[in-house]
Amino acid sequence: MKKVAIYPGTFDPITFGHIDVIKKGLKIFDKIIVAISNVDNKDYLFDSSERMNITKKALFSDLKLNKNKITVISFTTLTTDLCKKYKSNVILRGLRAVSDFEYEFQLAGMNRKLNNNIETLFLMSDVENQIISSKFVKEIIKLKGNIKRFTTKSTIKLLKEKYE
């Protein structure tokens, strides 16, 4: 039976930090479901279909990652419901810094309460990617800064178009 992990997030936009977690996850799991949240409680720069398009271009066109091992979806449900739908008992989460841990710890606990068969696996991106956040990437590009070290070429192009 294939080992499948759900990697939920807003991916607004995807960064090398996210990609690092995906690549590390692929060393452990047969398949990663990159699940792009589309809940209404966030103020997104890109809508759900744009974020899916950006993520797919980054992973499959820019980086040439294996489409058979990664699926990109959009969702509006509980992550635990996604786990059931995709027959996964693992939620993959990335940690950048200690400041992420408290929120992620609470989230993992709530998911465990919703379904005690689901484990959350935390992966850290490499040191050079730990400081990257989508929020900072958007802020830098908005102020005409260089984000080449933070995300892929196609993502940079789409970000620049958004802010022109």
Image: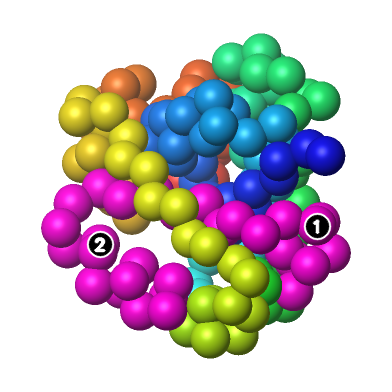
Q: Is residue 159 above or below residue 107?
A: above
Amino acid type at circle 2 is Asp
Residue 15 in sight here: no
Q: What residue did someone put label 1 on? A: 87
Q: Callout 2: few (<14), some (14-19), or many (20+) C-alpha neighbours within 10 Å?
A: few
Q: Nearer the viewer, residue 29 or 160?
A: 29
Residue at 35% of width from left, 79% of height from top?
106
Tell me the tag on residue 11. none
Side of 37 where 44 appears, left or right: left
Q: Quadrant of residue 53?
A: top right
Q: Is residue 143 magenta?
A: no
Q: Residue 111 location, x and y as percent?
A: 54, 77
Side of 112 where 68 appears, left or right: right
Check disc 1 and report its element: helix, strand or loop. loop
> Which numbered disc flags the more N-terminal residue, 1 or 2?
1
Amino acid type at circle 1 is Lys
Q: Residue 82 location, x and y as percent?
A: 74, 66
Q: Quadrant of residue 76?
A: bottom right
Q: CA distance from mark 1 to mark 2?
A: 27 Å
- Labels in figure, total: 2
Residue at the extreme left of the image, as rendered:
98
Q: Nearer the viewer, residue 23 or 132?
A: 23
Q: Is residue 82 magenta?
A: yes
Tell me the tag on residue 100. 2
Point out the image quarter for the N terminus: top right
Q: Residue 87 location, x and y as percent?
A: 80, 57
Residue at 31% of width from left, 50% of height from top?
95
Magenta highlight range: 81-109
Q: Nearer the viewer, residue 152 or 34?
A: 34
What colour-coding does the image apply? rainbow
Q: Residue 81 location, x and y as percent?
A: 74, 74
